Image (cartoon, rainbow, N blue to C red):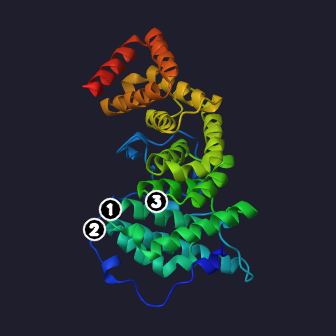
Amino acid sequence: MPVPQQAIQQPSGTVPATQLDLPGSAGQVMMLAAQQAIQQPSGTVPATQLDLPGPAGQVAMVAPQQAVQQSSSQVPMSSSGSHAALQTTDQQKRINRELVVAGKRSSLEVLKVVQRTLGQMNGVNLSTAFHRISRGGAQGVTDSGIFSRLLEVAECYAEQELANRGSSLPANCCTIIAWSCAQLRTFPPSLFAKLAAIATPQLRSCQAYEVTNLLWAFAEFYKYEQDTASTVVSELRALVDAVADVFSGRSTGDFKVQVLTSALMSVSALPWDQSFSSTWLLNSSFQELSSRWEELELEAQAQVAVALERLRVKCAPFFNSLLRRAGQEFPAVKISLEAHLLSRVR
């Protein structure tokens, strides 16, 4: 694997118009800075900031000017001292602004910015680029040579972070990159393994939705490329253990129901694992969702039913124990779930 500076050397010439110059619009979604993710407690994201098209909560956002404010420890230092570092910070703020503006137009416009600035990007810029591309809505972006180079650079930064633990690629940036790749249905196994290896020991520095977004990305990996995903089974087990550890520190109500639903859906979608962490996560998430059932929209209740149906197929005794306990403590929830399950059969 080349070092980042080698990986991001740009070829001469411009990208063909057919690759980049397609019009399009993207939802206005901003990126969360690594430093802010550490400063904010888990589960405090307002519900109005969450965009939930499916089983996993998407990334909740803040304004772009906040997203690009980084501590000096996240900015590569140069031999010229603090003044050069300050210039680098300003440059990376500018890159983030350009990525955000381009993302409002299309993912192909984001690729144009990436082509020009890849050599100057830091970890936060990389995660912004991936996220904006995944939200841009254009077809075929993953076939672009520029996107391939972006993947290479992300893996180089991940290798550098694993070697030095110097905040070149913070944990929350890893969750964003993995989530974005999963949205694009792009699953480089070596990159996913490295992203998980970086983020897993630092999950407590992430927001709760970032934790479950990473878990969801791995669930999607198994959904679309099960054979390839089997090569990252050890990283997945460590990740599930770490997610269970994060969830074990919560009190009822600390996490949004969207986060709990995402955890339940993701773990239920993974290959069945009788480990304590997996079964505890499923049981704990389901029990709290049952106790807060009225907070769930009908779609979310249906998603819980989908998760239970998966568990019924994979391990009927475990499914029966969940439903039996729900019936004892929350009879109305059991009735609701049985209705959802019956409607799926029909």
Alpha carbon separation for disc pair 3 and 1: 15 Å
Q: Quadrant of residue 124?
A: bottom right
Residue at 45%, 46% (x, y): give it. Answer: 223
Seen at 38% across and 27% down, the residue is 305
Nearer to us in this view, 68 or 178: 178
Please report whichever mark, 3 or 2, sits nearer to the chain's N-terminal start: 2
Q: Residue at x 38, y 17 (%)?
A: 333
Where the N terminus falls, by quadrant? Answer: bottom right
The span from disc 3 to disc 2 (Cα, nearest Å) is 21 Å
Q: What residue does disc 1 label? A: 137
In the shown orientation, is residue 52 left or right of residue 148?
A: left
Real-space Cα separation, disc 1 to disc 2, in angstroms: 7 Å
Q: Pointer 1: residues within 10 angstroms few (<14), some, or many (20+)?
A: some
Give residue 152's position: percent from left, percent from top. Answer: 56, 70
At label 1, the amino acid type is Gly
Q: Which residue is mark 3?
A: 186
Residue 138: image x %, image y %?
32, 65
In this rendering, which labeled residue sits more in front, label 3 or label 2? 3
- Residue 168 position by quadrant: bottom right
Residue 56 versus residue 346 in the image, above or below: below
Place of residue 91 in the rendered image (x, y in percent of width and height, measured from the top left): 55, 77
| CB within 8 Å, label 1 to label 2 | yes
Element on which disc 1 rests: loop
**Secondary structure state at the residue bearing disc 2:** loop
Which circle, 3 or 1, is nearer the viewer? 3
- Reading the image, the residue beneath label 2 is 24
Of the residues under marks 3 and 1, which one precedes in the sequence? 1
Q: Is residue 295 visible?
A: yes
